[in-house]
Amino acid sequence: MFILGLVIVMLVLIFLFWFLLSQSKKPTGLIGILMMRLWNGVYLPLVEWAINNVNLNDYSAILDIGVGNGASSAYLLQRKNSLSITGIDLSEAAISQAYKKYPDNKINFESMDVHHLTFTAETFDLVTAFQTHFHWSDLDRALREIYRVLKPNGVVIFACETAKINYFLPKLKNSADFQRYLSTFDFSLINQQTTSQWTMYTCKKIK
């Protein structure tokens, strides 16, 4: 009886893990809305830290990928009101929440898959991806799409918890390995910053 109970508990925990993981990739329903509110409190400090290490005066058109309910895009606009910002997320529920929470018409929110961006080539100066790139099912394809929509010498920033890189992308947790990987897509790693919890990569389109 004890063993049966233990098995049931383990199965429930496994189910909860995968359910919450799926919600972190694509939030849906009430659970998704509640999780996005939680993320704002947990991950917005990461966004603020990363953006405060960027000179936004160098950029005018920004694509913010995986915005959840829009907090990162809103913070970008707060830092520089003249920016043109497009925030995308795979989740339609997330984009709906983003429009409700941040109705400012200077931010354009769209439901879109990073693997299939619908923007024309060379649209953005800067692409940001906060706490999301380790979830992408095909990182190669996503990088090709980001490269395509970036202007010449455009920049992409990946910032997330270091633990997430170590767990989901163990082959790329070393910066030298990540640099070699990026070079195959004509990106150069121009800066890396870390704290005790977070890692931020700044990469430049080199062709």
Image: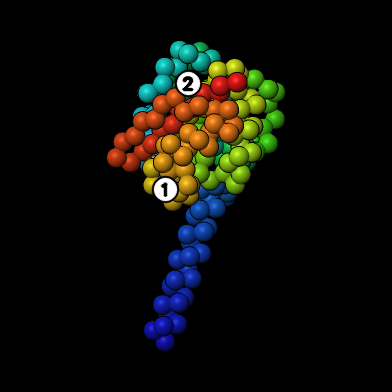
Q: Is residue 50 above or below residue 12?
A: above
- Is 90 positioned to the left or the right of 178 in the image? right
- Please identify the residue farthest to the left as the structure is shown: 196
Q: Nearer the viewer, residue 103 or 74?
A: 74
Q: Is residue 135 left or right of residue 51?
A: right
- Which circle marks residue 52 in the picture? none
User: Which image quadrant: the N terminus?
Assistant: bottom left
Number of labelled discs? Answer: 2
Residue 93: give x, y in percent of width and height: 59, 42
The amino acid type, in three-letter code, at marker 1 is Asn
- Residue 75 versus residue 124: which sits nearer the camera? 124
In the picture of the structure, the residue carrying the numbered disc 2 is 77
Q: Is residue 137 above or below residue 151?
A: below
Q: Residue at x 63, y 33 (%)?
A: 144
- How crowded pointer 2 is (Cα within 10 Å; few <14, some 14-19, many 20+) is rated as some
| Image coordinates for residue 125, horizontal then vertical, percent | 56, 19
Q: Nearer the viewer, residue 56 or 156?
A: 156
Q: Position of residue 52 (x, y in %)?
A: 37, 23
Element on which disc 2 rests: helix
- Residue 131 appearing in the image: no
Which residue is denoted by mark 1 in the rendering?
166
Q: Residue at x 45, y 77 (%)?
A: 7
Picture layout, residue 1 above or below residue 180: below
Label 1 crowding class (10 Å Cα cut-off): few <14, some 14-19, many 20+? some
Q: Is residue 117 visible?
A: yes
Residue at 61% from the left image edge and 27% from the top image edge: 147
Residue 168, position as x, y percentages in the image: 48, 49
